[in-house]
Amino acid sequence: MNKWTRRSFIAAGLTVGGGLIVGVAIRPGNRSRKLAPLVAGDGETLVHTWVKLDADNVVTAIVPHAEMGQGAGTALAQMLADELDADWALVRYEEAPATSEFANSPLGKGMLLAGVDIPEIVVPTVDGFLLHTAKALDLQITGGSLSVRTTGVYGMRVAGAAVKAMLREAAAEAWQVPVDEVVARKSHLVHEASGRREPYAAYARAASRMTPPASPKLKTPDEFEIIGRHVERLDIPAKVDGSALFAIDVRLPGMLYATVRRAPTFGGGIATLDDGRARAIPGVVDVVRLPASQARALVGSFEAAESVAVVAEGFWAAKQGLDALEIAWRITGHETVSSDAIFEQFDRDIDAGIDREADVSEGDVEAAMARAALVLKSDYRVPYLAHTCMEPMNATARVEDGRCEVWVGCQSPLPFRQAIADALGFEAEDVTVHNCFMGGGFGRRARADFAIQAAQLAAHVGRPVQLIWTREEDVRQDFYRPAISSRFRAALDADGHLIAWENTYVDKHEPAEAPLIPYAVPARDIGHVASPTHVPFGAWRSVDHSQHGFFTESFFDEVAAAAGQDPYAYRAARLTHKPRHLAVLRTAAEAADWGRPLPKGRGRGISLQESFGTLVAQVVEVTVSGGRIQVDRVVAAVDPGIAVSPDGLSAQIESGIVYGLTAALYGEITIENGAVAQSNFNDYPALRMSAAPQIEVHIIRSGHAIGGAGEPGTPGIAPALANAIYDATGSRIRRLPFSPANLERFDELRPPA
Amino acid sequence: MAVLTVNGVTREVDVDPATPLLWVLRERLALTGTKFGCGIAQCGACTVRLNGQAIRSCVTPLAAVDGQSIQTIEGLAPGDGERHPLQAAWIAHQVPQCGYCQSGQLMSAAALLAGNPDPSDTDIDRAMEGNICRCGMYGRIKAAIKTAALAQAGGATKDGGGR
């Protein structure tokens, strides 16, 4: 199976790029003429790869990211508009087309070169190298909370500043005045001395013929006017009147509908198929067996088994047809695998410690354990999780005259294009991907399995097909957040000081730093062992932080409790070397009135997690009564460095918290007979309004490098809640979810004696 | 042949009467604002109003609504270029993220306000409990409903209630 591996991307990027670049200076000039036919409409001038201007002086940011709810388009447009000194009322954005010419080289630059000073003279060469690399890698992905901190920083701001410089130069030339005297202000060029004032649009054409400066002068944060300001998201009006176009809303002439099923036991195929009853259902057009598929992209690679689809005049008939199929699945050998067996395997592999690889090994842990006054041991585990995006997986395809068009909502349009082309035996150039709004992504929509099925169906029936997965298929054929077991030992001296931290867990993915803790401890040994299963897995909002945030921040709380100390004070005392972390922790604690006594049955818990460049501390207040958990309040303090879109950031943190809370309270995909036991929201529930806590988000603007927003809210909620439940009841929960079943099984929620 | 009044317009539909209203709206009447989310009345993405009441169209057979009045998200605004107070409040509170559940959320909220112009927190929880938002915008939805209730009390707009 595959991993969400930024690291392997970087390694491969260097190899591929290295092969291209040896001895060659790649210096892109102005690419606008070549790109304009791809994006410029009537009356629009493409001034720069990422910037269009139209006759009405409207600026359009061309954003190489997909919209799955995170609001990146608006934030990226803000970054571009600020550097461009554009009038925000005249700013729009659109998603870049899925062609390699719009491969996201700024994303590569952010990932590869963050914090690296590049000498001015080689900046164009480096940018050219990155463009080639980005094209070779089909780099057009949305994930890793990366959009603002890479594309925004290395792409949109630079593009905005470059276009401003070009426009000023064009005006200076036309007006025969020194360029220093031409000022850009609210989408106009102004020459104070002569009183001349013209809209940007007047010089768009002249500017589009210039070579953009590779490293134009950028604003300092005190000069920001649009970055950091509350603006309304540009995509929201269409989302309140039903007009926003999701892939499932695409309608093509002559289009058929389809739905599909794969073997419930992963890797299984079809042994026998009787489709007689299905074909007899009015409206059913065809029953089609679809071959197994795979993608080898660096991000979003997968293998998926064969499937069977019913194609009909409408979804309802297709669904009736699917239910009428009589299918015998091929035996895979995984039919006896259960969640219990998987967790037993994890425990065995941790016990055996074979080929254990250290993430961090510092100081002498064994010596510290030997001289400790107290050694604390705990085992933690979390289950598999599905993504359950609100919009079930779907794609619409048309295959005609050796060309394929696919309408889909996906996180990586270029890798989707390649995967679809490979599956059909087409060249990538003969496949067009129209990316639509996503009804949630969370990592699931980085894998093209469902889009390939739609393309295969359209090719087979010779008419456009909209394939819609049932929710049951969505729950049972996901690429799951991996289940993990994690074992801890901590050594405390007689004064309660933490002197050693040891942690061994199964299955390392990304980001590499997820299991690390920020607290000062003289000896640390954190490592992992492999323990593969047959369950397909993939990135899930916050990736490995979603598991390790719960593990480490819960166990650290256990250490504080064993030391007999307040969990906030104990953390703070071990963060004196990390003032930024300490400030975030303190902000959350103070905003939540940490230390104010709570009535019996209520508790308060705290957590701190750095992820994707952003620090988040959370304080949870919980009421526990009669085995029922009610999360009353969550106070989050967030340091993203610079908050580009403060309300958007806040919304993302709120969203990340609720997503993590759903997982903490209910989320459990169990494996029975090698297959997923759950099927829909009735047995894989999501948080509903009555259970949703009041959430307060406090933003700290530390001025550090911009961090991510989409994911950092998620990891800290489960541990803060577990710690709050401990505070309320004295019971320590080491397995998620905190579902009634789990609580009963572990008898965790008795009130303290 | 079933005859419906959808957003004030009479529509004739000739499909299997067991077909859920959701697919009739989306595939036959080109009203794609109403969404498919689960197919078993668990998520609320398919919520529309039947004679003013919020229903889950994914489990409502066409035969059950023959001759009756349906309002979908496309018919929520009082007129062209206008917004229902809920839609205005949704924007003011920046409610949607991915936006996929919002048609259903808005229709549930519209049904609530039509019958209860000044809902309490508990009233709102109860009315909105059937609508899942995987982006987790419950706090903003609740705040927006209260804002819309205030705006409506000010007589801003009359809710047609699907009639």
Image (cartoon, coloured by chain):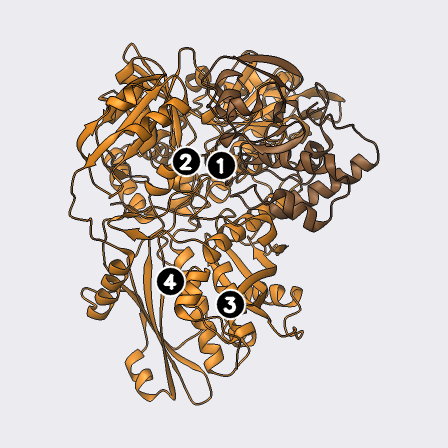
Cβ–Cβ under 8 Å for marks 2 and 4:
no
Three-letter amino acid code of the residue under disc 4 = Pro
**Colour orange, chain:** A
Three-letter code, disc 1: Met
Query: Badge 4, how many Cα within 10 Å: few under 14, some, many 20+?
Result: many
Q: Are marks 2 and 3 in contact (CB under 8 Å)?
A: no
Asked if the residue under mark 1 is in contact with the one under mark 2, i.e. CB atoms within 8 Å, the reply is yes
Q: Earlier in the sequence, mark 4 or mark 3?
A: 4
Report the residue marked by disc 2. Answer: A411
Placement of A234 over or under A432, stated as above or below: below
Q: Which of the two labelled residues, at mark 3 and mark 1, occupies the earlier sequence position? A: 1
Picture disc at residue A508: none
Mark 1 and mark 4 in contact? Answer it, CB < 8 Å. no
Q: Earlier in the sequence, mark 2 or mark 4?
A: 2
Helix, strand or loop status at disc 4: loop
Q: Residue at x 33, y 65 (%)?
A: A486
Alpha carbon of mark 3 to alpha carbon of mark 1: how far?
34 Å
Chain that bears disc 3:
A
Amino acid at the residue labelled 3: Lys
